[in-house]
């Protein structure tokens, strides 16, 4: 068990006083990983950026797939709503320091209403008595024009039925980084976007700072994966990671948020904010690196297709890791578009049973509801869960619960859920659950019901040239817009005092270490690399492993004594989701264990482990340089987060279904295992 208690992160003086690497590096700190994230995260990140000095940017990532559609519904109710509801709480603690120290803020907190968010940012600054910030709005993601809607309808018809007239709640493409880069180059203090690809929040500042060409694929890919490590906030710093006895995280209640130092070649060093809890090491980085990736050699973004198959992850100091070797390929010719539409109503109801016979009474209550609720009222199955017996790892069809023999659990909560085409049918479910108080089995109590409109999701590809990004700056006395032409070249449209327009082509912004009409970063020195201490001699590095790393530790002879353990003693990993597809990473604790994973964790073995979820396909991607396998499972999420009735509609727990698999381990490799009863040696772990 790892008992390390370091929570100082980059405050270690040996990390902040070492010589810089190449001049002109860029620090990017992340202060939010989703809408509703902790609002106290930005303070230590900004304090660390100020202490380190040099060009720096603060990013907020607040848009999940469904968040934007919900924001659009909010805007329909109130024209000044539709942006991140926690915007005030996120920005107020740090806006003054960011303006004073010339640290631009970039966030997709504009959601469905970036102009209103921009106005709110200006109002916050005024309320705090600050100078008026230059606020840029990056728009163009919303597909609203008649021509765009016609093209969208044509694209959707290629893989499904047309949507009814008036059903669309929102339709947005994932824009790339160019608009963000232009806004920063023109001197924006705050850049507000709607839907952009999550990594583009980091790629945009890197483009502006280094002046990379838009086809410098390797550098763009490196910055993209830096952004991928940052975009989920605390996850890379030990959040969504802790597993007591296997993956211990110190001071998790104060888990830190990450900062990346991006170099001119696109490589990055990632560390966490000063004085925060959590841990950031090669294990947390590898989990986040593979999070929500399908093919690790072809991670599609609007800016580049990134390839991490030859990437290296190396420890370079306490809570500090370097990512290098990411390769890039030309960006896709199309954007991804998400279309959300009205799709009926979701009804849920719960009731608890406790004491002797509780499970039997809960099962009986479920049978009563199934008999009384008319299947014609529903879209799909009536899901029945017994929380405490079978729920999260069950399925919408109820196969897992039916196969599980009735037990004697003494504290059980019955949950039922169903989708309905109209509110009347949904109301009937909630009423029937409430009626169990007096009409159901004995001892039922604690009824809770929930009723809400459902949003369906369709995704398609949309022609890039028909969704040009635009950038508008305000509070600078010279409003203008940046447009992207169909051939991908950009120009800044400025308006003179006589109303005529002129086009200024984009220069190699940032090539001198700063940009912007107001000299946004000119007064900040190049940042020291806070983490380039000598490599820890006692820790082997993944970078030292060859692409055929699993052959460096040949499998023991068949006569070698073995023992059976749970997979999580030999490996760790996490689950990510996109639509009805789940990816699950499996990462060896040590290179010596990797051949066992390759030999025993086959596609067929994983498919059998998920038999109750009925995957339509299981694909295995080997990453020997990282000592990792990435599994992609299609059709295991009952339609995905917008359709599934599961309490865990994202499938977050599915990694533990894999980690519970048995693994045969030779006795000679037992010292590399982790977990209770294992005499794990910290110096033996992989980098």
Image (cartoon, rainbow, N blue to C red):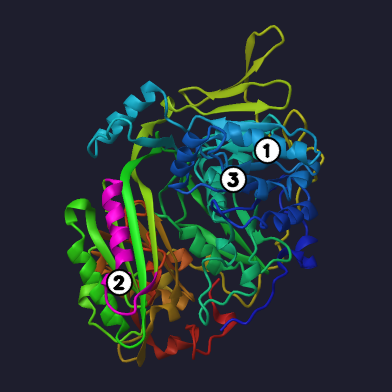
Q: Residue at x 22, y 37 (%)?
A: 161
Q: Residue at x 70, y 68 (%)?
A: 534
Q: CA distance from mark 3 to mark 1?
A: 20 Å
Give residue 250's position: percent from left, percent from top.
63, 75
Q: Which residues are magenta?
A: 422-446
Question: Badge 3 local density, few (<14 within 10 Å), some, or many (20+)?
Answer: many
| Residue position marked by numbered label 3 in the rendering | 202
Mark 1: which secondary structure?
helix
Quick one: 509 or 33, which is closer to the camera? Answer: 33
| Residue position marked by numbered label 2 in the rendering | 438
Quick one: 583 or 14, which is closer to the camera? Answer: 583
Mark 2: which secondary structure?
helix
Give residue 278's position: percent from left, percent from top.
63, 69
Number of the front mark, 1 or 2: 2
Q: Residue at x 24, y 82 (%)?
A: 406
Looking at marks 2 and 3 on the same chain, the residue that comes earlier in the sequence is marked by: 3
Instruction: Determine whether label 2 and label 3 are within 8 Å by CB.
Output: no
Q: CA distance from mark 1 to mark 2?
A: 53 Å
Task: Decide: is 560 above or below 250.
Answer: below
| Residue position marked by numbered label 1 in the rendering | 121
The magenta stretch spans residue 430: yes
Left or right, 609 with respect to 226, comes to left
């Amino acid at each position: 068990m790892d008992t390390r208690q370091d929570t100082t992160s980059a405050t270690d003086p040996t990390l902040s006083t070492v010589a810089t690497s190449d001049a002109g590096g860029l620090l990017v700190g992340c202060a939010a990983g989703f809408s509703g994230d902790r609002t106290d995260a930005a303070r230590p990140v900004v304090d660390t950026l100020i202490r380190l000095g040099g060009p720096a940017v603060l990013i907020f990532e607040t848009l999940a797939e469904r968040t934007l559609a919900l924001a659009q519904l909010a805007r329909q109710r109130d024209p000044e709503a539709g942006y991140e509801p926690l915007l005030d709480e996120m920005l107020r603690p740090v806006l003054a320091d960011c303006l004073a120290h010339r640290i631009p803020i970039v966030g997709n907190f504009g959601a469905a209403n970036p102009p209103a968010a921009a106005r709110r940012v200006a109002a916050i600054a005024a309320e705090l008595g600050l100078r008026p910030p230059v606020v840029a709005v990056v728009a163009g993601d919303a597909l609203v024009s008649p021509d765009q809607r016609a093209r969208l309808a044509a694209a959707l018809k290629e893989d499904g039925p047309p949507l009814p007239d008036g059903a669309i709640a929102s339709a947005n493409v994932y824009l790339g980084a160019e608009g963000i880069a232009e806004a920063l180059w023109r001197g924006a203090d705050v850049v507000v976007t709607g839907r952009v690809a999550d990594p583009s929040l980091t790629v945009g500042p890197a483009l502006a700072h280094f002046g990379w060409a838009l086809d410098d694929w390797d550098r763009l890919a490196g910055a993209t994966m830096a952004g991928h490590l940052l975009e989920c906030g605390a996850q890379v710093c030990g959040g969504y990671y802790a597993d007591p006895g296997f993956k211990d995280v110190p001071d998790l209640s104060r888990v830190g948020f990450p900062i990346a130092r991006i170099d001119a070649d696109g490589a990055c060093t990632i560390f966490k904010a000063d004085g925060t809890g959590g841990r950031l090491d090669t294990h947390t980085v590898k989990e986040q690196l593979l999070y929500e990736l399908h093919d690790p050699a072809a991670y599609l973004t609007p800016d580049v297709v990134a390839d991490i198959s030859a990437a290296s992850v190396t420890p370079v100091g306490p809570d500090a890791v370097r990512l290098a070797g990411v390769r890039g390929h030309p960006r896709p010719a199309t954007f991804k578009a998400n279309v959300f539409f009205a799709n009926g109503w979701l009804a849920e109801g719960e009731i608890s049973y406790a004491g002797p016979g509780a499970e039997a009474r809960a099962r009986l209550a479920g049978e009563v509801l199934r008999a009384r609720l008319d299947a014609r009222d529903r879209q799909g199955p009536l899901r029945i869960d017994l929380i405490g017996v079978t729920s999260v790892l069950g399925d919408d069809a109820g196969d897992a619960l039916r196969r599980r023999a009735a037990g004697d659990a003494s504290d059980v909560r019955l949950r039922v859920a169903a989708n309905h085409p109209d509110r009347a049918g949904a109301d009937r479910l909630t009423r029937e659950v409430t009626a169990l108080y007096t009409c159901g089995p004995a001892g039922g109590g604690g009824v809770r019901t929930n009723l809400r409109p459902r949003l369906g999701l369709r995704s398609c590809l949309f022609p890039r040239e028909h969704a040009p990004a635009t950038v508008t700056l305000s509070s600078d006395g010279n409003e203008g817009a940046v447009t992207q032409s169909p051939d991908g070249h950009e120009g800044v449209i400025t308006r003179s005092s006589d109303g005529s327009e002129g086009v200024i082509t984009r220069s190699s912004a940032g090539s001198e270490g700063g940009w912007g009409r107001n000299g946004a970063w000119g007064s900040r020195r190049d940042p020291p690399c806070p983490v380039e201490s000598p490599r820890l001699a006692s820790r082997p590095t993944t970078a030292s492993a060859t692409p055929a790393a699993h052959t460096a530790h040949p499998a023991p002879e068949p006569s070698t004594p073995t023992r059976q353990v749970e997979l999580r003693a030999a490996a760790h990993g996490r689950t990510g989701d996109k639509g009805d597809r789940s990816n699950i990473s499996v990462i060896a604790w040590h290179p010596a264990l990797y051949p066992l994973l390759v030999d025993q964790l086959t596609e067929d073995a994983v498919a059998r482990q998920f038999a109750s979820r009925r995957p339509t396909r299981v694909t295995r991607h080997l990453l020997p340089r990282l000592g990792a396998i990435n599994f992609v499972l299609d059709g295991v999420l009952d339609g995905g987060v917008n359709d599934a009735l599961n309490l865990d509609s994202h499938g977050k727990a599915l990694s533990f279904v894999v980690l519970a698999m048995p693994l045969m381990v030779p006795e000679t490799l037992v010292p590399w295992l982790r977990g209770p009863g294992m005499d794990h040696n910290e110096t033996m772990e992989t980098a």
